[in-house]
Image: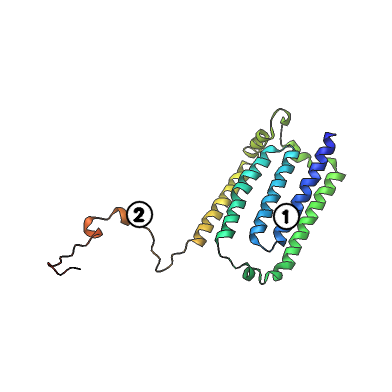
Amino acid sequence: MLTGIAAAFFYLFAFIMVASAIMVVAARNPVHSVLFLILAFFNAAALFLLAGAEFLAMILLIVYVGAVAVLFLFVVMMLDVDFAELKQGALQYAPLGAVVGLVVLVELVVVFVSNRIIPDFAAPVAGAVTNAAGRSNTQAIGDVLYTDYVFYFQIASLVLLVAMIGAIVLTLHHRPGVKRQSIAKQVARTPETAIEVKQVESHKGI
């Protein structure tokens, strides 16, 4: 009975996630697209919970829903972006997008068929976690991530750091005529440079 209920919830969450993912692309309003993206994240987290990976589910909710998607939502709502102009010429990238989508589809089919035909296809992945029965998946992920894959983990952090620096450099423009705050100049101010004393004759002032 429990297996049937779990399977029903799996198909329910999977259907909502796929439908919301389609609406992310199909929605005309960018705010609606971000809201559908948040809905897709919630359903993906529910699927992780059904699979017993509660750590990945919480990470998906905290990082992607709590930070990334909310950031997208605020950026879309606060910036006056002409999305109609951005969408012009998007069809010229349709063939490249179709090729990339076809490659991803072929990879998914290969993995699915290989897992069905060859039962030991995922054995190297499962064999990386030793003594997983007596530990939670959070401990198992931490052991594998910081031992066998620590080099790749550091490389990923460097890539994110470079991306952050690049985003700051691309968005930080020094426009002429715009006043900018200089902490050093403010701290170095003296009474001689901060005020100017005018000697006004008697009965000549305003």
Task: Specify few, some or many for label 1: CA neighbours under 10 Å numbering under 14, 14-19, or 20 or more.
Answer: some
What residue is disc 2 on? Answer: 183
Label 1 or label 2, whichever lies nearer to me, is 1
Chosen colour scheme:
rainbow
Numbered badge on residue 21: 1
Examine the rendered structure and indicate whether residue 23 appears above or below residue 136.
below
From this view, report whether residue 138 is shown above or below residue 94: above
Amino acid at pointer 1: Ala
Residue 155 visible in the displayed image: no
Residue situated in front as seen by the camera: 202 or 97: 202
Quadrant where the N terminus sits is top right
The picture places residue 81, in percent across and down from the top left corner, at 58, 65
Question: Where is residue 201, by image quadrant?
Answer: bottom left
Q: Is residue 170 left or right of residue 51?
A: left
Q: In the image, which disc is placed on residue 48?
A: none
Q: Judging from the image, what secondary structure is the residue with disc 1 in?
A: helix
Expressed as whole percent of the image width and height from the top left, the position of residue 115 reads: 83, 44
- Residue 161 appears in view: yes
The alpha-carbon separation of the residues under discs 1 and 2 comes to 46 Å
Give the secondary structure at mark 2: helix
- Of labels 1 and 2, earlier in sequence is 1
Residue type at the position of mark 2: Ile
Q: Position of residue 116 (x, y in %)?
A: 86, 44
Residue in the foreground of this view, choosing between 59 and 33? 33
Residue drawn at x 15%, y 70% is: 204
In the rendered structure, the answer to whether residue 182 lies left or right of residue 153 reads left
The residue lying at 22 percent from left, 56 percent from top is 191
Q: Position of residue 76 (x, y in %)?
A: 59, 59
Q: Quadrant of the C terminus?
A: bottom left
**Badge 2: residue crowd in 10 Å (few <14, some 14–19, many ≥20):** few
User: Mark 1–mark 2 contact, CB under 8 Å?
Assistant: no
